[in-house]
Image: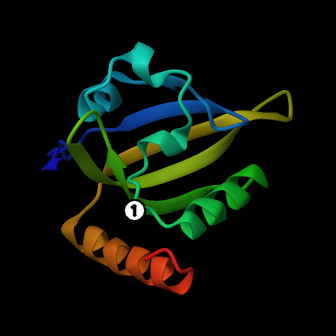
Amino acid sequence: MEEVELKDNAFLISKTDKAGIVTYSNIPFQHATGYEEEEIIGKSYTFFLDKETPKALIRQLWDRVSSGKSWQGVVKVHGSSTKYFWVDSLISPSYMNDEMIGFLLIKRKASSKQIAEAQLLHKKMREEHGEG
């Protein structure tokens, strides 16, 4: 797989509905993943997570944001074909008229230190939950 080198100042932004289905993506997100906007819209946010992302991590993330709280962490994102990149991701609920309508996902390039720490954490979580 080919690692995509994200620009230090790039913000990859997407929005989802309450079910986690992507409703918006900005151009830097599209360029990083190698997908066109039409290919991104309508997909679950989990589609873009690397297949080795611990299921327990995804559950923790989803439980937290669906309860109205923000989540921050480092995850590996896969793009089209053989592209991937690591991001420091912030996911926050979006509201309209005091009703949660979805989520805002803001991602930035993860540092080497953040990536190393995330790799260890993800490995530990997979082992603890019998995911290999």
From the viewer's perspective, tell me whether residue 29 is left or right of residue 25: left
Which of the two residues, 52 or 66, is positioned nearer the viewer here? 52
Vertical position of residue 127 compared to residue 22: above or below: below
Establish if 103 lies above or below 77.
above
Label 1: few (<14), some (14–19) or many (≥20) C-alpha neighbours in 10 Å: few
Residue 62, given in percent of the width and then of the height, sits at 66, 55
Query: Residue at 49% across / 74% down in the picture?
Result: 131
- The residue positioned 20% from the left and 68% from the top of the image is 112
Q: Is residue 123 left or right of residue 94?
A: left
- The quadrant of the rendering that contains the C terminus is bottom left
Specify the farthest residue to the right: 98
The image shows residue 39 at horizontal and vertical percentages of: 41, 19
Q: How many marks?
A: 1
Q: Residue at horizontal 62%, vertical 47%? A: 92
Left or right of 28, for residue 90: right
The amino acid sitting under disc 1 is: Glu
**Element at badge 1?**
loop
Q: Is residue 126 above or below residue 21?
A: below
Q: How is the image coloured?
A: rainbow
Question: Residue 67: x and y, percent?
Answer: 79, 55
- Specify the farthest residue to the top: 38
Image quadrant where residue 33 sits: top left
* 99 vs 59, nearest the viewer: 59
Which residue corresponds to mark 1?
52
> Where does the image place residue 50, in percent across and percent down from the top left?
38, 53
Above or below: residue 130 compared with residue 87: below
User: Which quadrant would residue 6 be assigned to in this image?
Assistant: top left
90 left or right, relative to 79: right
